Image (cartoon, rainbow, N blue to C red):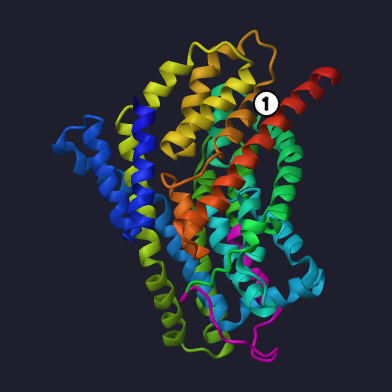
Amino acid sequence: MPLLVVGISVLILLLLMTKLKLNGFAALLLVAVGVGLVRGIPVMDIPDVLSGGIGDQIGDTMLTIGLGAMVGRVMGDSGAAQRIADRLLEAFGPRWVQVAMVVTSMLIGVTMFYEVAFIIIVPIAFTLVRVTGANLLWVGLPMSITLSTMHSFLPPHPGPTAVAATFDASVGHTLLYGLFIAIPAGALVALAWPRLPFVKAMTPEIPKGLVSERQFTDEEMPGLGWSLFVALFPVVLIAGAAVTDMATEGESGLLHTVAFIGSPATALLLTLALAVWAFGPRIGRSLADVSSSCTSAAQAMAMVLLVIGAGGAFKNVLVEGGISDYIKDVTQGWDISPIILAWLIAVILRVALGSATVAVVTASGVVLPLLAGSGVHPEMMVLAVSCGSIAFSHVNDPGFWLFKEYFNLSVIQAIKVRTTYTTVLAVLGLGGVLAAEWALDVLGI
């Protein structure tokens, strides 16, 4: 049974990494090869499947994570990250630092990919941890939870946007309805999860090389204006491109240029160039010093990228092994509410494959025939699929490894924290979608 193969492979992976202490990169590749053999992928094709999965994953994340890490380190070594962290502390106070992270993450995460927003905000979270002496998860977890919610629930993020096209739903209405669900659900989980006893018992250290350990004086730090300008520069570029894409139709040279500048890789590359000048020669730092910051960030990210790439290989083997097709065939005959069915199929695919994109695309294709004549608002179907795709993030999800490595957790700790919070978000999202559908029916909208 395909799902049994998935379950056994995950258990073997956990055994290799927890009991045998095998490196995550090697463990993921070994298990991926084993799954490929069991699922009948020809031996000669397995290397191509692995490299294809690594290439797809690294192609999507390497530029974003690498450039973002360099920007963060340049800001950290110049004192810009501390300047922003100090201003947040002044505005919210140490007692409300979690609220500061939730608000910041919501504003930035509405239009930005989880990985991009994470890489931009995490240096500030690290600096807040160092300045306040708080637990890393106490400050960082609200940020990650909020970004996960924004990314999974709302267009113009890839999953919800793709599903909106499948269901012929209004992207604007989906975003509007989704905000009423995402904001309370994300804020609730973000503020509650760090207070749970099993989370408070974890005391991870900030990973070496990703943030400056120097404590700057007020005179040494760049001004707040420049610090915020550089930090928000990629947000403005990416958000501007997303809004332009949503508000316009057709094609033109100008729209193509806006899309190019607003792509995450281009936006972060331009931001890095700006940061090198603004926090280098402009304030008297040599280019060699700034280059050293970039090199340190790249070195610190090397293993993170390898593990994320191996996670992509594992995911690709599961997809190529026909597991998504098996789930699609099994669930097509289920006779339940279209909203619940859409959510449930997305959850099952997410658990089995780890890919939120595959989960939403497959689930939407299965339930699309049920939408006609059901009376369900297509926007609610989009949100149901999107909410389901966030559930049960675990070892076959490359985002799981980004979370684990940045917060310096063991595999078991990451499962306890991330797998649980993503699942609760998915359940709260389903409840919100059902309530919103009922409210729209009552109001006759």
The residue where tag 1 is placed is: 380
Q: Residues within 10 Å of mark 1 (few under 14, many from 20)?
A: many
Specify whether residue 218 is painted magenta: yes
Please tell me which residue is depicted at 48% across the width and 51% down the height of the picture: 400
Specify whether residue 98 is painted magenta: no
Residue 133 versus residue 370 in the image, above or below: below
Magenta segment boundaries in residue numbering = 208-235
Please tell me which residue is depicted at 52% across the width and 57% down the height of the picture: 413
Q: Quadrant of the C terminus?
A: top right
Q: Residue furthest front?
A: 19
Foreground residue, 61 or 261? 61
- Left or right of residue 113, residue 33 in this image: left
Q: Position of residue 427 (x, y in %)?
A: 65, 35
Q: Residue furthest right?
A: 443
What amino acid does circle 1 point to? Met
Residue 297 versus residue 444 in the image, above or below: below
Q: Secondary structure at mark 1?
A: helix
Q: Position of residue 343 (x, y in %)?
A: 59, 27
